Image: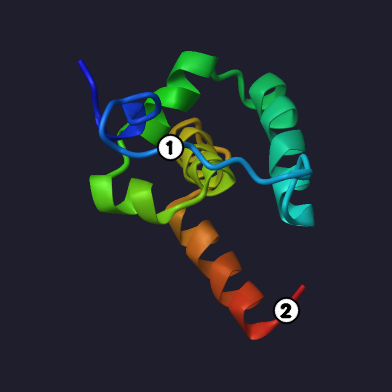
Amino acid sequence: MNGIHDLGGMHGLGPIIREENEPVFHAPWEGRAFGLFAATFVFAGYTVDEFRHEIEKMGHAEYLEHSYYEHWLVAFEQVLEKRGFVTAEERAKRMAELEKGVH
């Protein structure tokens, strides 16, 4: 079954445009998100399938509006909350602090 996350390689969507000399990460936070995968994978004990499933559960519009590593952040939030490492309230509080510039 194909979903919104299975668009790669489908006919009629135009060519895939590759960025010349594309960097591995476009911003420092993307590299940190990549590092979080290994750390949380071992620490929290989730599977790659579970991680991918969290990405695939995103709504179509949300999926298309987010970048590759933003998808990862959504999955981190979900698997870590499911396992009790963080609550929705804790995430909301920290996001509010970050928006205010509190580090």
Q: Is residue 40 left or right of residue 21?
A: left
Q: Which residue is mark 2?
A: 102
Task: State the residue in front, 35 or 5.
Answer: 5
Residue 36: image location, x then y, percent: 71, 37
Question: Given contact means CB atoms under 8 Å apart, are the residues at marks 2 and 1 in contact?
Answer: no
> Vertical placement of 97 versus 33: above or below?
below
* Quadrant location, the C terminus: bottom right
Q: Residue 15, labelled with which disc?
A: 1
Residue 43: image location, x then y, percent: 70, 25
Quick one: SS at disc 1?
Answer: loop
Residue 79: image location, x then y, percent: 48, 33
> Vertical placement of 38 versus 31: above or below?
above
Most extreme residue toward the left is 1
Tell me which residue sits at (36%, 39%) in the image. 14
* Quadrant location, the N terminus: top left
**Cα distance between the residues tagged 2 and 1:** 42 Å
> Vertical placement of 4 versus 6: above or below?
below
Q: Residue 94, labelled with which disc?
A: none
Most extreme residue toward the bottom is 100
Q: Is residue 82 left or right of residue 48?
A: left
> In terms of image quadrants, where is residue 99?
bottom right
Tell me which residue sits at (44%, 39%) in the image. 78
- Give whichever of discs 2 and 1 has the lower sequence position: 1
Disc 1 marks which amino acid?
Pro
Q: Residues within 10 Å of mark 2 (few under 14, many from 20)?
A: few
Quick one: SS at disc 2?
Answer: loop
Residue 5: image location, x then y, percent: 34, 32
Q: Nearer the viewer, mark 2 or mark 1?
A: 1
Tell me which residue sits at (58%, 39%) in the image. 85
Q: Residues within 10 Å of mark 1 (few under 14, many from 20)?
A: few
Disc 2 marks which amino acid?
Val
